[in-house]
Image (cartoon, rainbow, N blue to C red):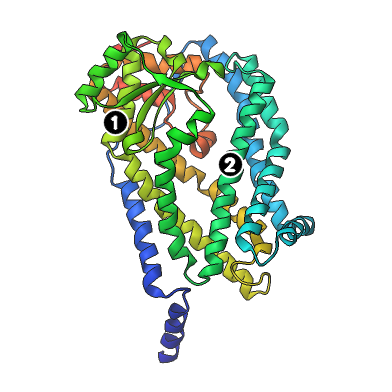
Amino acid sequence: MSHRRSESSLDVRRLPGGVVPWSIVVVIVAVGALAVLARPLAPDLGPVPDPGRWFTTPQLERIAAYQRPLRWAVLLATIVDVAVPVTIAVTATGRRLVARVVNGIGVQRPGRAAAAVTVVIVGLTTLVGLPVDLWAHRHARLFGLSTQSLAGWAGDRAIELAITAVGAALVVGVGYALAARWPRRWVLVAIPLGLLATAVLTLSAPLILEPLRYRVTPLPPGEVRDELTDVLAAEGRGDAALLVADASRRTTRQNAYVSGLAGTRRIVLFDTLLERPPPEVALIVAHELAHERHRDLARGVLAGGAGLAVVCALVDGVARWRVRRGRQDGVADPMAAGVVVAVLVVTLMVTAPVSAWVSRRAEAAADLGSLELTGAVADYCAVQRGLVVRNLSDPAPPTWARLWWWTHPPAASRLQLASTFDDAACAN
């Protein structure tokens, strides 16, 4: 018995960096999970109801004609996103490609080399998935959802590719640089650094990233602004910035979002959304205000810290497992950068249902908050029906698609929630 206890103690002491630092990682994960689980919630209304209660047969048929092929296209794009990095990681051809990139920069520069490998993988993934992206653009134009020319769409895709490539390269490159500097404790440095970077990005996104996609201007005086001012005052947010994005240059879809942090915080409305009656626009803003009331941004940061801790620990564990088996030279070996990217991509895919579930809970609670703030059940239902018809959103998607990708409750469930307040006001 004493011999077994000695072996167990030895295993614990061999944790990279020691027991105490990894205990801190466990605490971070626990705090993040608690932030997600202990939060305001909307009531669970059970299975998604029949959307035929709120939508006509022609409306549902048009939505299905748009959504059915799109679902398979999204599934194919997801397969491509995973297959390309995994293929590069596990095949001899892929390893030769990684070696060529790394040798071109130098093994002695692991951060730069790993970042370059990441850019190559992102570029190849985009190239392989380009036919699906082109089809999706044409499909959206066919149904009147896109107003962009092919050239305009290609310009936007190039900007998105650049942002994705640079972001991914920074994440992997900095991770490798930390692992090279602190091979036993790099995870413990990466977690707070990642949280800081997330806060900086959230703060600066309205000033740096959003202008690459939209031009925003202050919401002009008028009925819409008057309606929104009343809602903001009721929530104690009379100082909130109200902006309008020129989304109609790209799409006919209607949407709104909140971005920024502290001094850069703003509520942005698509200009297409201003076609709706002012009370309906106010309902959408009330939904966004409910997110703030529930402190969803802070909860997201804590949950992100937990996710970051898990991912870093997983990458570190895979790297050390490979080192023990002689498959790579040290945790910061840039020749293994393809494996790291593959682990990250597969992890994101596998955890997507969890992320979607967390988001749906938050969105359902914000729906409830908007109804409680305004009491405008009829307007709420008009918004949900109008957005479904305008955006051709599936009001009751298949279970597999909903669980894997849907970050918002289906419209049929949102309408059922409103019906619990006033069934007659929500009748079609």
Residue at image location 59% in from the left, 55% down from the top = 343
Task: Please name the residue shown 49% across and 66% down the image.
Answer: 186
Q: Where is residue 10 drawn, in percent x and y?
A: 45, 83
Position of residue 367 relative to residue 196, above or below, is above
Please give the count of numbered marks on the rendered protein. Answer: 2
Task: Tell me the CA gap for discs 2 and 1.
Answer: 30 Å
Query: Residue 349 location, x and y as percent?
Result: 56, 46
Quadrant of residue 47 in the image? top left
Type of the residue with mark 1: Ala
Residue at point 74% right, 58% down? 104
Q: Seen in the image, is 319 located left or right of residue 371?
A: right
Q: Is residue 157 above or below residue 339?
A: above
Q: Residue furthest bottom?
A: 2
Specify the amino acid type for callout 2. Thr
Report helix, strand or loop for mark 1: helix
In front of the other: 95 or 419: 95
Q: Quadrant of the N terminus?
A: bottom left
For disc 1, the neighbor class at 10 Å (few under 14, some 14 to 19, many from 20) is many
User: x and y percent of residue 329 in the render?
Assistant: 65, 72
Q: Is the C terminus in the top left, top right, bottom left or bottom right quadrant?
A: top left
**In-image side of 342 versus 44 (left or right):** right
Q: Which residue is mark 1?
A: 290
On the image, the x and y values in percent for residue 6 come to 43, 88
Q: Mark number for residue 164?
A: 2
Mark toward the start of the polypeptide (2 vs 1): 2
The answer to whether residue 44 is seen in the rendering is no
Q: Is residue 211 visible?
A: yes
On residue 82, the disc is none
Mark 2 is surrounded, within 10 Å at the Cα level, by few (under 14), some (14 to 19) or many (20 or more) other residues, namely some
In contact (CB < 8 Å): disc 2 and disc 1: no
Res 66 → quadrant: top right
